[in-house]
Amino acid sequence: MSATDPSVQTPGAGPAAVAPSASPSAGSAAAPASFVVNVPGLADADLEPEPLDPGQIVSGEPVVTGKVLWESPDGKQIRGIWQITPGVVTDTEANELFVVVSGRATIAVEGGPVLEVGPGDACVLREGDRTQWTVHETLRKAYHISL
C-alpha cells in the first residue's frame, strides 16, 4: 500500500481521508509516512494458503493462511494478516511486531520467556528467536515484519 491508497488513513479520519506523505529533510533518505490501515472485516478477511514445512509440525494438523497487505519496495518491510489453526509448530522468527485479532496461543521462546497471547495482545519477536507455538484456538494476527 502506498500513502495514496484510499485505505490508508490518518487517525480519526473518515474513510476517504488519506495520510499525508513524509517530508524528508534535505540530504536524508525518505522515511515512510505514519499511517493507519483500515481493513474492514479484518477478522473475516479472505486469506490464502501458506503451506507449512512438515518438519515444523510437532503435533496436530495446523493449517496456515495469510495475506500480505503491504510490502516495501526493497522487500524488507512486510505487513499483513496471518492465521494458524490449532496444533503445535516450530519456527525461527524474523523481527516482528504483531497484534492478535482472535484466538489464543502459547509461544515458547528457546532460552527465553513463554508468551501467552490472545485478542488485543501486542507481541514482539526478535530475528533468530527459535519458537514453539502451541495454538489453542485458531489464531489470527495483524503483523509487521522487518527483514
Image (cartoon, rainbow, N blue to C red):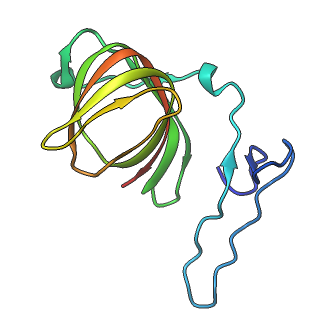
Residue at 76% from the left image edge and 54% from the top image edge: 10
Q: Quadrant of residue 40?
A: top right
Residue at 70% from the left image edge and 77% from the top image edge: 23
Q: Which residue reaches farthest left?
A: 111
Give residue 108's position: percent from left, percent from top. Answer: 22, 33
Instruction: Classify 118 as above or below 96.
Output: above
Instruction: Classify 145 as above or below 52.
Output: below
Report the side of 146 relative to 133 (left or right).
Answer: right
Give residue 102's position: percent from left, percent from top. Answer: 51, 22
Report the side of 56 relative to 14 (left or right).
Answer: left
Residue at 52% from the left image edge and 56% from the top image edge: 72
Q: Which residue reaches farthest bottom?
A: 27
Instruction: Classify 80 as above or below 52.
Output: below
Number of dots carrying numbers:
0
Q: Quadrant of residue 139?
A: top left
Q: Which residue reaches farthest top?
A: 60
Point out the image quarter for the C terminus: bottom left
Report the side of 3 relative to 29 (left or right).
Answer: right
In depth, the one of 142 and 109 nearer the eye is: 109
Residue at 45% from the left image edge and 26% from the top image edge: 118
Give residue 128's position: percent from left, percent from top. Answer: 21, 49
Give residue 89's position: percent from left, percent from top. Answer: 23, 23
Instruction: Classify 119 as above or below 28.
Output: above
